[in-house]
Amino acid sequence: MIRKFAKYWRDSASLLVVARDRPTVHREKYNYKVLVFKRTAKTSFMPNSVVFPGGGFDKQDGSLGWEAFFRDRNVSAGELKKLTEVDGPRPPIFHTESTDWLDRNVSLRLCALREAFEELGVLLVSDEQKQKRDPLYSNCLHSFDVSTWQQRIHDGEATFQELHTALGTVPDLFNLYEWSCWLTPAMFRKRRFETAFFLAVLNEIPNIHPEPHEVQEYYWETPAALLEAHRAEKIWLAPPQTYELTRLSFIYDIDELARFATKRNRKGSTLLCPVQYNAADGVIFVLPGDDLYPTGYDYISDNHDLDKYGEVPQEVIRKQSTRLHRVEHKDLHHQAFFLNHQPLDDHLHIQGQNVIPKEC
């Protein structure tokens, strides 16, 4: 499968797993927590960083064998096609470039589900009965030998499809909500990933089985607590994680989040590829919609204006701009987020200026 940008970056998928949890402190606002894990020091990409589960796209994720699998389990082609009906931006990762491969709107969900199982033992499956009770929520299966299957799939001794065939289960594609799409900045030439992010909402915190070669430790925490740990330099969150946790941090109720994700699911995802500018007191990464974002950016070229504002403080540069969509970095652990117009793709506002309906 030779893709247009294959020589510049790899494709991957990540899963934001949020689960209902009763607040342990009376003053705590959130009734849910987010699942993240710390990569081991030997991980090839961003070792020791705290991330959402996810990883590189594998050819098994795009195999047409999945079509027969779903057909045998009475998942119709029409149901699968609904996942492809998106009215909004489609970054390169979502382009299906050959009829020899499964549609990318399906295969990227399979990739995210597979990686969540490989890394943390979280297997999300369709359950008709639970779906009737909680139509917006996904379901995690525990009643099988998780560790053995996890190791076999991680080591390449079995496929994700073989796991579901053995269990008689169906991957829960339909309760994964398209969330965002990020591309590593062009300056990281040798280690770039375009990553599709999906959201899964659970009604209870599932058991976790960390894969020892990839997972140093894992955390269930509120968005605000993870961001505070990052600022206190207890953990280091990669930039997409700080952005996504920041906009999640303004949503305190998991039911509200589930309703929002369902409503936004088919509105597309603008590719978020940060472009760097140096400032006198730190670094600025601008995103699409910002005045400083390059017009018609090709996602490959360096920013020739990198040092244009190198002697100017971040605040002064900000005040010179009309439209803002940027992250100002003082250092690796301290960022400030700015957005002064409607969020792209009807998404959550990075500064919390959200209006979310009570019903879908």
Image: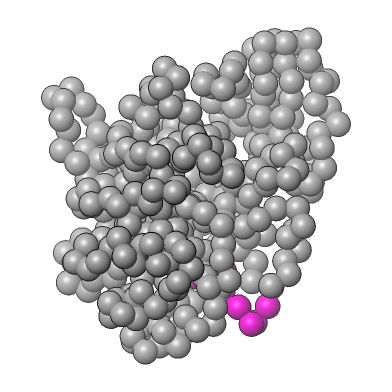
Query: Residue 186: image x %, image y %?
Result: 74, 41
Residue at the location (60% across, 63% down)? 94
Residue at the location (56% across, 22% down)? 332
- Majority secondary structure in the magenta region: loop
Residue at the location (68% across, 45% down)? 191
In the depicted structure, whether residue 95 falls above or below residue 73: above
Q: Residue furthest right?
A: 304
In the depicted structure, whether residue 88 falls above or below residue 30: below
Mark yes or no: residue 91 visible: no
Query: Residue 88: image x %, image y %?
Result: 58, 58
Image quadrant occupied by the C terminus: bottom left
Left or right: 234, with 57 as reference point: left
Left or right: 124, with 238 as reference point: left
Image quadrant occupied by the N terminus: bottom right
Q: Where, by quadrant of the figure, is residue 187 drawn?
A: top right
Nearest the eye: 37 or 3? 37
- The stretch of residues the image draws in magenta is 98-106
Mark yes or no: residue 119 visible: yes
In the depicted structure, whether residue 169 falls above or below residue 205: below
Residue at the location (36% across, 39% down)? 217
Give yes or no for residue 102 being in the magenta stretch: yes
Query: Residue 147: image x %, image y %?
Result: 30, 60
Query: Residue 122: image x %, image y %?
Result: 32, 57
Q: Where, by quadrant of the figure, is residue 135 drawn?
A: bottom left
Give yes or no for residue 179 being in the magenta stretch: no
